[in-house]
Image (cartoon, rainbow, N blue to C red):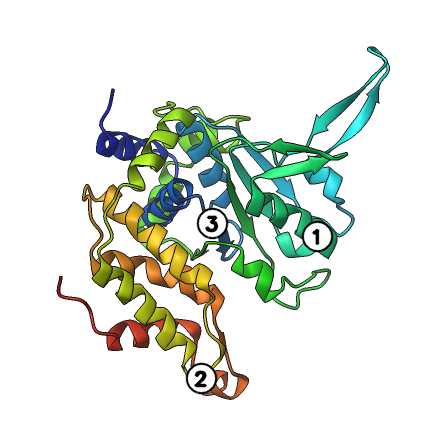
Amino acid sequence: MKSSIELIESIMSEVSKVVIGMGGVMKALLVAVLSGGHILLEGPPGTGKTLMAKCFAKVIGGSFRRVQMTPDLLPADIIGTVYYDMSTSSWRVRYGPIFANIVLIDELNRAPPKTQSALLEAMQEEQVTIEGESIPLPKPFLVLATQMPYGASGTYQLTDVQIDRFAYNVQLGYPDRRWEEEIISKIDYIEDVGLKTPEPKLETVASPEDISRLTSEVRKVYVSESVRRYILDIVWKLRGMEELIYGPSPRASIWMYKGSRVLAFIDGRSYVIPDDVKLIAPIVLLHRIRVKPEYEVEGVTPRSIVDRVLGEVEVPKS
């Protein structure tokens, strides 16, 4: 049996055969799946989100489904429904695409509010209810959701409460020039192995049971009292910022705590250090704060606020 570190390295290495130049995003996926959180992905189209999700699911031995949200999509189209089977003269459950280990929800804010709510309920409770029967979702269970820009035609803007349900917010940009050159040179291989195949032709190096074992080990990572206070100092300082309409919710503290444990675990440590908190802070905090309009026109952004707070809050020495 591979050690935990060897298993993590194998996952990263195998996915990187096809997904090029996205090491930071891949680490965020690992953080999410090992901490039990979900990710809101934001960025321009054509940056490899579907390919990355498909390949990650294949490599960890999980199932993958993609849902394209549209204004006429109903909750039953995602969670499933009951139908009458003529061949057996009985009622049966048709499971929706939510029943997968990795679910990519494209353009979440194009779906009507009722459908958005059904998805977010499934994310929160890790189960769905069909005709009064509660059915657990597979484990691990990770939702990656993208959304169109605010105000785009045919969208239903997510509320701040809904956005807060996502543990992490990962911003995707265009690849560096050198990575894009490598993508071009390997495009035939990428298409043959991962892009134009129903299932990526990559080696499965882990299993859902392995992920469950790693998740249990992550929970054993030690977080000192001083590091816990550091997390709270960051969150509470943000809540008191004049530039913000509101600060981060208690979920921010929880996911900084959980995410920093995973980062420590990935680095082979049994304890969290302040640098783990600093590294996880942006993807936990940026989507949970809103800058007042009068400060936005002056160029103040959530990123600049978070960077400033991380620079001002005293870092514990031990």
| In the depicted structure, whether residue 112 falls above or below residue 231 | above
Q: Which mark is residue 243?
A: 2
Dot placed on the residue nearer the N-terminal end, 2 or 3: 3
Q: Answer left or right for 94 relative to 91.
A: left
Question: Which residue lies at the image location 27% right of the left edge and 41% below the top edge?
Answer: 220
Q: Secondary structure at mark 3?
A: loop
Residue 305 in view, yes or no: no
Q: Which mark is residue 166?
A: none
Question: Which residue lies at the image location 43% right of the left edge and 83% below the top edge?
Answer: 299
Q: Residue furthest left?
A: 317
Residue 290 drawn at (x, y percent): 50, 74
Q: Nearer the viewer, residue 214 or 18?
A: 214
Amino acid at dot 3:
Thr
Q: Which mark is residue 47?
A: 3
| In the depicted structure, whether residue 288 falls above or below residue 213 | below
Residue 264 drawn at (x, y percent): 24, 47
Residue 149 drawn at (x, y percent): 59, 64
Q: Answer left or right for 207 relative to 136.
A: left
**Neighbourhood count class around disc 2 (C-alpha, 10 Å): few under 14, some 14–19, many 20 upward:** many
Q: Secondary structure at mark 2?
A: loop
Q: Quadrant of residue 147?
A: bottom right
Q: Nearer the viewer, residue 277 or 190?
A: 277
Amino acid at dot 1:
Ala
> How far apart are labels 2 and 3 at the CA level?
32 Å
Amino acid at dot 2:
Glu
Q: Quadrant of residue 206?
A: top left
Q: Quadrant of residue 202?
A: top left
> How far apart are labels 1 and 3 at the CA level?
22 Å
Labels 2, 1: front one: 2
Residue under label 1, please give it.
111
Dot placed on the residue nearer the N-terminal end, 1 or 3: 3
